[in-house]
Amino acid sequence: MLAKYPLSIEETNALTRARPQLGAEAASEPVALPGADVAELVHLARAVLMKSPEDLAAIAQAAPSMPANWIDMFTAERARAVAEAKFWSTAIAYLMATAPSGVANDG
C-alpha cells in the first residue's frame, strides 16, 4: 500500500518530464511507450487518487504547473490506450469477419 505522501517534489518532477505526443497516425496502431514510463505514470495516478482535495490544492499552490502537467500526461496516456484498444478491436473484427462461422468467439 502506498503511503499518504508517496512522492517527494523531486520524484514528482522526475515523473512530469515531457512524454511522447500522439499524432494522427497513432490511431492506426498502438504506440509503444517504455514500460518504466507507464509504470511511473500509473504510480503517479495512484498517488494522486490517494490524496485529498486539500492536499491537491496545496500541491497546486506550491507548484502551479504540476497539476496541469499531470493532466497533460494522463490525457496523453488515455489517448494512447484508446488508440491501442481501437487497434485490437479492428484486428478482432477483421478476424471475426473472415473466420468460418463455426469458429468460437469468447469476445
Image (spheres, grey):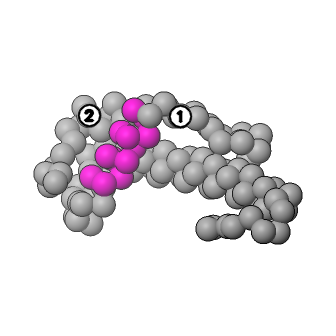
- Disc 2 to disc 1, C-alpha distance: 20 Å
Within 10 Å of disc 1 (Cα), the crowding (few <14, some 14-19, many 20+) is few
Q: Quadrant of the C terminus?
A: bottom right
Q: Give how far across and how far down residue 14 sits, in percent.
A: 34, 30
Up-down relation of residue 77 to residue 21 (above or below): below
SS for callout 1: loop
Which quarter of the figure has residue 35? top left
Which residue matches tag 1?
Answer: 33
Residue ID at (84%, 62%)? 100
Residue ID at (23%, 55%)? 58
Residue ID at (17%, 51%)? 2
Which quarter of the figure has residue 99? bottom right
- Amino acid tagged 1: Leu
Q: Give how far across and how far down residue 68 sits, in percent.
A: 45, 49
Task: Please name whichever residue, 88 or 104, is drawn nearer the observer in this view of the structure.
Answer: 104
Q: Quadrant of the N terminus?
A: bottom left
As drawn, which residue projects farthest toward the left?
3
SS for callout 2: helix
Residue ID at (72%, 57%)? 92
Magenta region = 36-47
Disc number placed over residue 52 in the picture, else none: none
| Residue 76 left/right relative to 67 | right
| Residue 59 left/right relative to 70 | left
Disc number placed over residue 11 in the picture, else none: 2
